[in-house]
Amino acid sequence: MPLSMNFGKIHHIFSSLQSRNYRLYFIGQSISLIGTWMQSLAMSWLVYRLTGSVFLLGVIGFTSQAPSFVLSPFAGVFTDRFSRHRIMLITQVLFMLQALMMTALVMTHTVDVWHIVALSLVFGLITAFDAPARQSMVIDLIDNPENLGNAIALNSAMFNGARLFGPAIAGILIAVVGEGMCFLINALSYFSVIYALVKMKVRTKQKILKTENFKEGFMDGARYTFGFPPIRSLLLLLAVLSLVGLPYLTLLPAYTGGVLKGGSNILGFLMSATGAGALLGAIYLASRKSVLGLGKIIVFSSLFFGLFLIGFSLLNILWISLIIMFFTGLCMIVSIASINTLVQTLADEDKRGRVMSFYAMALMGMNPIGNLCAGSIASIIGISHTVLLSGIITLLAGIWFARIRPSLKIYSHPVFVRKGIIPKNEINKS
């Protein structure tokens, strides 16, 4: 009996892959994201190698994601008006062109810091439209809506599996042949997801926004998103985590070189340790069959995320840092993916694109501000003290959410009941 139960749980981890469209998406994105993580590490290392500036690391982190803060809410209206599948196909082609431009500049030895800043800004502009479409399209790719939570968790597993392998490969390649090969591999990797999107047969489930007034559509989405306490609170917590918790990733190149006295290979190991922990956390979430208990999971993962950041700032020994990075990555992804699942589950379908645009704004829009602030603060008080401050604020955010969580059940439970997700007698678990 225990053996059969284990097999059942393993089978459930991959339940959303039974849908052909999602399976194509999963395979294509798995390949592409390895290239994306290779480019991310190569770009950070290239900037630090050329300038030695912690502040410029923050600038690159800012420019690559800042457009999401400004444009994502408007892109959300766009996402609800047009085919999410077609939007994503266009953005992947544009991502590939951006990577090819970086490849040409680096391999011809003509790259300068302003090129990197400009192309990271282009990347951010594309992401502002890609993220809402990609986040809200997931439900269009699965045949059974009950697999939404599983699909989101598998997305996180895919993302962090790539985080596990991409930086490690990039670290070795940079040491052997330089950063240019990482940008080239990333450019070529986009063919996989473009092919997958072309081969899909998507019968969209979204209700296309009919209003002719763009402003009215935007305001309607904003009122809905911030007028519903559970979604508002989840996005506020996510914004804090993104603003003060996630910038430690941007500081890793400087931490590696300045504190641990290591090279690109050590940076790759640290990033991979984060990815390994995040991958395990995503697999755990994929093994869950219900949204029940996710609120409690968000509380504990947020609290421990803060605690591990504090530990990372205080214990500057390589093998200890690797262990802490593993658990930091686990707590980070469990928090983010759980918030994603609850927000998508709570959102009305005809407003999903706009709700997920505010999700993207909270996650990818606040993060560049945090990166810029972290780079500036680290240049004044040092990297370790900056990470310590981030950990303390993240811990306080977790405590705040723990205090308000019981009151949010009053609003979220009727939605779950209306959607047939949970019976009425499960309120204490949600």
Image (tube, rainbow, N blue to C red):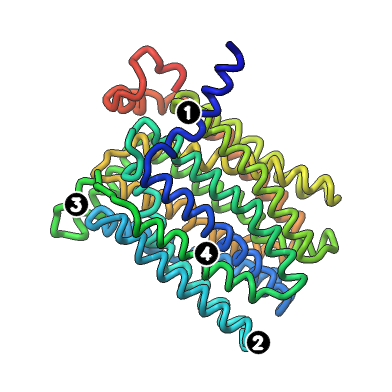
**Which amino acid is tagged 4?**
Ser
CA–CA distance in space, label 2 to label 1: 53 Å
Residues 314 and 52: in front is 52
Q: Mark 3 points at which residue?
A: 209
Residue 296 appears at what percent x and percent y? Answer: 53, 27
To which quarter of the image does residue 152 belong? Answer: top left
Residue 47 visible to an observer of this rendering? no
Q: How crowded is mark 3: few (under 14 residues within 10 Å), some or many (20 or more)?
A: some
Residue 271 appears at what percent x and percent y? Answer: 69, 54
Quick one: label 3 or label 1, which is nearer the N terminus?
A: 3
CA–CA distance in space, label 3 to label 1: 32 Å
Quarter that holds the N terminus: top right
**Which amino acid is tagged 1?**
Arg
Question: Disc 3 vs disc 4: Cβ atoms closer than 8 Å?
Answer: no
Q: Mark 1 points at which residue?
A: 405
Q: In this view, does 304 lie to the left or right of 98?
A: right
Q: Is mark 1 on a helix, strand or loop?
A: helix
Quick one: label 2 or label 1, which is nearer the N terminus?
A: 2
Q: What element carries label 2?
A: loop
Q: Name the residue under label 4.
A: 189
Q: Residues within 10 Å of mark 2 (few under 14, many from 20)?
A: few
Identify whether 231 is placed above or below 169. Answer: above
**Which amino acid is tagged 3?**
Leu
- Depth-wise, is mark 3 or mark 4 nearer the camera? 4
CA–CA distance in space, label 3 to label 4: 33 Å
Identify whether 423 is placed above or below 57. Answer: above
- Depth-wise, is mark 1 or mark 4 nearer the camera? 4
Residue at 36% across, 20% down: 422
Residue at 71% across, 79% down: 50
Q: How many marks?
A: 4
Q: Which mark is residue 109?
A: 2
To which quarter of the image does residue 167 belong? Answer: bottom right
